[in-house]
Image (cartoon, rainbow, N blue to C red):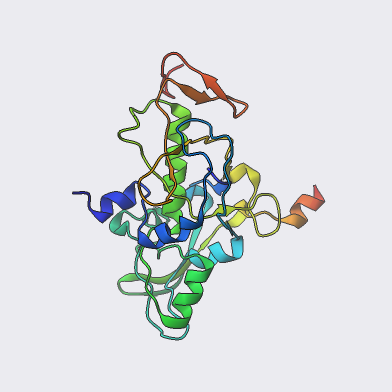
Amino acid sequence: MPGPMVAYNPGKLRFVPTKTDETGVIEGVVDQGAIIYNSSAEASN
Amino acid sequence: MIDNNFLCRFGVVGEVWKRYISTVSVNTMTVGAPDAVELSIPPSFVEHETEQLRLGRFSKTKGNRLGDCCEGKNCVAYLLRGNNIALHPYLTPSQQLEFDAHGTIIEGPCLLDIRKTVTAIAMLYRNDCVGVSPHNVMPVRVPFYNRVNEPGGYNASEMIMPSDVRLPFAPTNQNSVVLLSIPLPGHVYAGSDGGLQPRKTPVCANED
């Protein structure tokens, strides 16, 4: 394996629909939330 | 005859990726721990991946919509609460620019399905209970890697590290395309320190 990769863990992700119609979701974003490295959080620890 | 959907499910992700990672060079192409491996697989940063995880992606100039993940109805995006459509294929930064500039449609798996495939193989390897032989290796081609514990990267606790998945580089007849394959069960397993240890009998993860 050439390098690290984020593990598949849908429980850590949050889907946010941004556009819907009667059929359901048309557009949206996936919020990766706390899995993203936060340098300021690290600095405060 | 193996159809494209079958290949996709097992991590073989199409001609685009094949071309993309054809730049990878491997000095040692033997099953087992290679002595030296040189790779030129690029990093994929959070900002880029956030864009890849957006549903409803259109070419900025042509206006056409990017297709669905090649997994179709099996795309793991359906597992996200509140969602009822598949994600789009993961595009490398250069592919994204091409799509935005010319509307070039590229097929392949979405980012979540790439993560799923790699994670599944890592779990199989750790469990060491699959009947995999050199004749039925489960290939996965990894087109990028993520940064860890630095801006633009992810927390280390969320990552599969190379030391977790010491997959040998198997010989391939597909023109410089690297196949990451699982070694024979019972030969080695990943120890708690991430190193390879000898094992006499394969065991499954659910055995004590």
The image quarter containing residue B40 is bottom right
* Residue at the farthest right position: A44
In percent of width and height, residue B87 lies at: 40, 63
Please count the marks in the image: 0
Q: Residue at x 45, y 13 (%)?
A: B200
Q: Is residue B97 above or below residue B148?
A: below
> Quick one: B172 or B106, which is closer to the camera?
B172
* Residue at the farthest bottom position: B61
Q: Is residue A28 above or below residue B207?
A: below
Q: Residue at x 56, y 50 (%)?
A: B39
* Residue at the farthest top position: B200
In percent of width and height, residue B78 lies at: 36, 56
In percent of width and height, residue B75 lies at: 35, 56
> Quick one: B175 or B99, which is closer to the camera?
B175
Residue B179 seen from this side? yes
Q: Residue at x 63, y 55 (%)?
A: A36
In percent of width and height, residue B121 lies at: 43, 39
The image quarter containing residue B17 is bottom left
The image quarter containing residue B14 is bottom left
> Quick one: B49 or B84, which is closer to the camera?
B49
Residue B21 seen from this side? no
Left or right of residue B108: residue B41: right
